[in-house]
């Protein structure tokens, strides 16, 4: 964003598949706010316990301290009067009230930066993300690299059996895939690239 709004709050959403760099982008934007000596608060849902409970961590190991929450509503109670920018990672795991909470923050004059999966492993819109994307002023759709063909990837292929929408996992459980290479059905660990020692 070259021109930031002034004298108003607003909502930014960073969306895309797994491994597309959403968390890296969120951390980078938040660190720039810190360089400008502005106060931030960072949150994520308790559901996401892959690496550290009190940190937002990217696959490339960029980290930022954060507060895990059971529900998005808690942000309104925990908000510090000094805070100018709120960052929220893994937004897809929050409830349907996420967009209302984020709107309330922006209406109070805060900049809110939200990152989350826009699609679940079946390629269907994920939880509160469609509404969040609609109410946001600024949307960035990131792409990973398709692990089968190298195209830009906007979907997450599940590699382990099980039909639940939420299955917390990493490289052993998901792969970034493009439209042509993605299947809504789980594809248990068959990729030749994975077998060849992909980390
Ligand atoms: P997200 O939050 O979108 O899941 P992260 O920001 O945590 O993504 O991680 C992005 C990093 O993941 C990239 O910089 C790269 O190091 C790594 N990565 C692993 N697999 C892929 C892939 N298939 N395409 C792009 N980046 C990948
Ligand atoms: Mg992430
Ligand atoms: Zn592909």
Image (cartoon, helix red, strand yellow):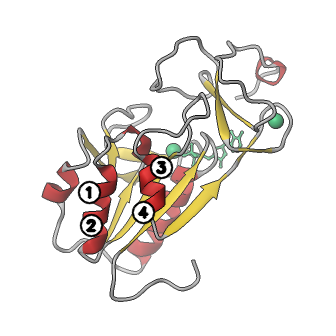
The answer to whether residue 41 of the structure is visible from this angle is no
Which residue is more in the foreground, 14 or 30? Answer: 14
Q: Position of residue 119 (x, y in %)?
A: 56, 39
Which residue is more in the foreground, 5 or 63? Answer: 5
**Residue picked out by circle 3:** 130
**Residue picked out by circle 1:** 101
Q: Residues within 10 Å of mark 4 (few under 14, many from 20)?
A: some
Q: What residue is shown at x 17% (from left), y 66% (from top)?
A: 80
* Disc 1 + disc 3, Cβ < 8 Å: no
Q: What residue is shown at x 45% (from left), y 65% (from top)?
A: 136
Which tag, 2 or 3, sits closer to the chain's start? 2
Which numbered disc covers residue 86?
none
Which numbered disc covers residue 105?
2
Asked if residue 171 is positioned above or below residue 81 in the image, the reply reads: above
Is 50 situated left or right of 21 in this image? left
Give SS at disc 2.
helix
**Residue picked out by circle 4:** 135
The answer to whether residue 20 of the structure is visible from this angle is yes
Q: Kindly give the residue lying farthest to the bottom in the view shown.
A: 7
* Disc 2 + disc 1, Cβ < 8 Å: yes
Which residue is more in the foreground, 108 or 33? Answer: 108
């Amino acid at each position: 964003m070259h021109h930031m709004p002034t004298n108003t709050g607003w909502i930014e959403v960073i969306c895309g598949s797994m491994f597309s760099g959403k968390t890296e982008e969120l951390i980078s934007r938040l660190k720039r706010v810190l360089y400008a000596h502005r106060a931030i608060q960072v949150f994520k849902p308790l559901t996401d316990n892959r690496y550290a409970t009190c940190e937002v961590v990217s696959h490339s190991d960029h980290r930022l301290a954060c507060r895990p929450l059971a529900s998005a509503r808690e942000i309104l109670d925990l908000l510090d009067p000094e805070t100018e920018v709120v960052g929220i990672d893994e937004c897809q795991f929050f409830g349907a009230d996420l967009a209302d909470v984020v709107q309330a923050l922006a209406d109070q004059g805060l900049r809110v930066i939200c990152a989350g999966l826009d699609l679940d492993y079946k390629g269907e819109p994920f939880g509160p993300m469609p509404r969040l994307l609609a109410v946001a002023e600024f949307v960035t759709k990131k792409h990973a690299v398709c692990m089968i063909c190298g195209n830009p990837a906007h979907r997450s292929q599940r590699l382990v059996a099980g039909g639940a929408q939420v299955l917390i996992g990493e490289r052993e459980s998901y792969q970034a895939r493009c439209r042509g290479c993605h299947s809504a059905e789980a594809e248990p660990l068959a990729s030749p690239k994975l077998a060849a020692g992909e980390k």
